[in-house]
Amino acid sequence: MIPLPPRWMLFTGVLAGLALVIPPAIIARVRATPDPNRAVHIFFDMDFQPKFKPQQVNPMFADGRSQRPMVAGTVAQGETNLDAHLHEGVVDGKWATTLPAGLEMSEEFLARGQQRYNIYCSVCHGYAGFGDGAVNKRAMELMSSSDGPADGTAWVQAKSLHDPLVREHQLGLLYNIATNGIRNMAGYGTQIDLEDRWAIAAYVQALQLSQNATLQDVPPELRANLKKEEVK
Amino acid sequence: MSRFLFPKWSNLLLPTIILSGAIIPLYAVFFVAYGFSPKTLEVGYQPEQPVPFSHALHAGELGMDCRYCHTSVEKGAHASVPATQTCMNCHTQVRPQSPKLAKVRESYDTGLPVEWTRIHKLPDFAYFDHSAHVNRGIGCVTCHGRIDTMEVVYQKSPLSMGWCLDCHRNPEQNLRPVSEITNLSWDQQTELSADERKALKDKFHINPSEDCSTCHR
C-alpha cells in the first residue's frame, strides 16, 4: 500500500477536481437559457464601423434615423408618377379595364398575383376572397367578446370579393383600392410593388370569375375533367 | 539538528503533476471552445422589445406570411422591420386602445420610428444578402428558427463564420422550393429526398463561393 498524503491535502485535491465541473455546468446553463443582454464584446476588430446601414440609428439627426426621409415636396428621379393608367388605374377619367402598357396578362402574371394576394390580402379577405381571412376571424371574435369589443376594437367584416358590387369593380379600381385603400382598408402602395398590385388586381378578377363561372367558360377539352371531379 | 526528509507519500506528487499538466491544457482548450463559442455567447439573445409584439400570434396563430411585414426581404440585402403604418393597417381597428400598443400609437402620431432592439447582427465587415438566399431556396426557418412559435423572438443560430461555411460547403441540406420559403413548419429534410434537394441545387445554379470577397468587401 502506497502511503497517502495527509487528509487535508487529499480533501483539497478532490475539491479542486470537483470544482472543474462548475465552469462547464455554467456554460451549459448559459447555452440553454435565453439572455436579455447581448454578449460582451472583447475583441472589437472591425465589428462596429462608423457607417450607416439600413434602419440603423444616426444620432446626428433629431429623429435618429440613418435613412433620411425625403424632404417634403421633392420628387425622386423616375418617380413623377404621371401615367394615370399605370399609377392611378384611370384612363380618360374612367377606371381602366385593361392592364397598363408594359404589363402582359399571362399565366405567370396571374400566378404572381395569386402569390402576392395570398401574402397581403388573404389575411382579411381569405384565400378564396370570401372575406374570411384569419385576421378578420380573430377581429370578429374580439368584437363579439362577452365583455364588449376588446380594447376599443371596432372592426367591420372584411368585404367579400364576390359581393355583387365588388364584382362590378373595374381592373383599374381594384388596382387603386390595393394602392390607396378604401373605407377601413389601408392602402398597400408602400408594401406591395407597383407591378404586383396590378397582378393582384388581375388575380382578384380571376377569383371572381372562378366563383361565377359557367360550364361554357371552361375550354371544351377540359370540361370532361370537371365532370369527373363532380362524380367523386 | 535533524535533516528534512520528504515523506513517502511525496512520491505521488510527480505522477500527479504530470497528470495535471496533461489534463489542464486540454481542459483550458475545452473551456474556451465550449464557453467562448458563438453558440454559447450569441445564441439565445432575447432582448425585451419596446412593444410586446408576438410573432407566435401574428405569424403562428394568424398565419400571416413573413413578407406581409418584412417586405424587402426578396428584393434587397436587408429584411426591413415594418413601418408603423403596417401595424396600423389593422390596429387602427383591432384593439386600438390596447396599452401594449402605446408605443405604436405614439410613433403613428409623431412620425418617429418605434425603437425596436436589433437581435440578429453581423459584424459590419460581413455583407449578407437576404434576397440572394430567399430567392434561391433558403427558407427563413433555416437561420431564424420557428419564429412562428416565439412569443418573444430570440436568436436561434450563432451567425458565426463557421456556421455560414457549414451551409456554403453543403447547401443541399437546406434547399427548398421557393414556394415554401416562408413556410416555417415545412422541413426540407423530411419533405424532400436527398435527390430532390440535389435537383434544386442544379435548378437554382447554386455554387456557393467560399472566397473571402464573397462576404467580406
Image (spheres, rainbow, N blue to C red):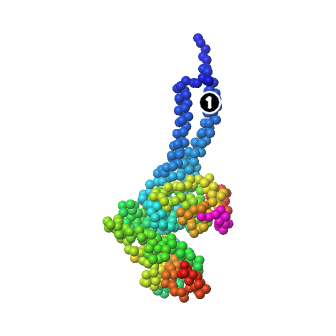
Q: Chain of mark 1?
A: B
Residue corresponding to mark 1: B16
Q: Nearer the viewer, residue B74 or B6?
A: B6
Residue that lies at the very extreme toward the bottom in this rendered image? A216
Please indicate, yes or no, whether residue A8 appears anywhere in the rendered image. Answer: yes
- The residue range painted magenta reads B191-205
For the point 49% across and 49% down, the residue is: A33
Q: Nearer the viewer, residue A209 or B111?
A: A209
Identify the image quadrant of the N terminus of chain B.
Answer: top right
* Residue type of the residue flagged with mark 1: Thr
Which element carries disc 1, helix, strand or loop?
helix
Residue B120 percent coordinates (x, y): 53, 56
Q: Nearer the viewer, residue A206 or A180?
A: A206
Residue that lies at the very extreme toward the front in this rendered image? A231
Residue A188 percent coordinates (x, y): 47, 73
Q: Residues within 10 Å of mark 1 (few under 14, many from 20)?
A: few
Residue B94 percent coordinates (x, y): 39, 68
For the point 45% across and 79% down, the residue is: A161
Q: Quadrant of residue A20?
A: top right
Identify the image quadrant of the C terminus of chain B.
Answer: bottom right
B163 magenta-colored: no
Please indicate, yes or no, whether residue A226 appears anywhere in the rendered image. Answer: no
Q: Main secondary structure of the magenta part?
A: helix
For the point 48% across and 67% down, the residue is: B64
For the point 53% across and 45% down, the residue is: A28
Above/below status of A177 relative to B24: below
Residue B136 percent coordinates (x, y): 61, 66
